[in-house]
Amino acid sequence: MGTGKSTVGRLIAKRLGLKFVDTDQEIEQVTGITIKSIFKRHGEIRFRSEEKAAVRRVSQQDNQVIATGGGVVLDAENMEMLKQNGIIVCLKADPEIIYQRVGLKKNRPLLQTEDPLTTIKSLLTERRPFYEQADVTVNTSNLELIEVASKVARIYNDYCTGKGVNKSDG
């Protein structure tokens, strides 16, 4: 969260002439309620179930950039589905940067705690092994979103032309 996935995803899709899909928007469209409301009414387990269904739907399509929530990596099946048809790029940022970007926003259910920065650090530590499964990682902490989009577009082009990907590209 707060690494620029949705904004960067839209920029990349536009640059490469691909469709952009955000799994959170997909979930809201299918369920008719917001992510925040799903968490509040039904809890995280229900959200993760909806998330998995969304990943299943969107991962079967070609020529698109998919932005997922940061917790999608917690389910190995999600990662397998996403890897079948493309590359996975993990956008990361320092906890303090993430806090500056999203720490006080009320639309982040997992951050509705007494100490959002500590929560962010805890989530990043817990999820680190899962994030490391990405094909490549780009640190967005000190980059403008357009710079991140350019990097990821280059990574994608290298992948498509057979040059492969450098696991840590920033």
Image (tube, helix red, strand yellow):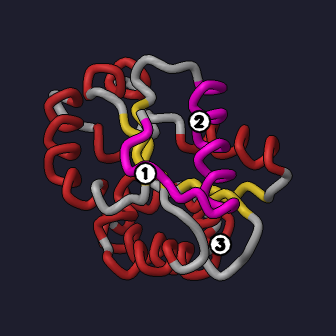
Image: 109 above or below 121: below
> Hey, what amino acid is under mark 3?
Val
Residue drawn at (32%, 77%), measured in percent from left and top? 76
- Asked if residue 50 lies left or right of residue 10, the reply is left
How far apart, in angstroms, are the residues tagged by discs 1 and 3?
30 Å
Whichever of labels 2 and 3 marks the residue nearer the N terminus, that label is 3
Q: Are marks 2 and 3 in contact (CB under 8 Å)?
A: no
- The residue carrying mark 3 is 30
- Per the rendered image, the range of residues in magenta is 145-169
Q: Are marks 1 and 3 in contact (CB under 8 Å)?
A: no
Whichever of labels 1 and 2 marks the residue nearer the N terminus, that label is 1
> Hey, what amino acid is under mark 2?
Lys
How far apart, in angstroms, are the residues tagged by discs 1 and 2?
11 Å
Instruction: Return the x and y of residue 78 as percentages of the image width and height.
Output: 42, 75
- The residue carrying mark 2 is 151
Instruction: Return the x and y of residue 139 as percentages of the image width and height.
Output: 40, 32
Specify the label residue 136 is tagged with.
Answer: 1
Label 1: which secondary element: strand
The foreground one among 160 and 89 is 160
Instruction: Return the x and y of residue 23 as percentages of the image width and height.
Output: 57, 62
- Asked if residue 6 lies left or right of residue 80, the reply is right
Specify few, some or many for label 3: CA neighbours under 10 Å numbering under 14, 14-19, or 20 or more. few
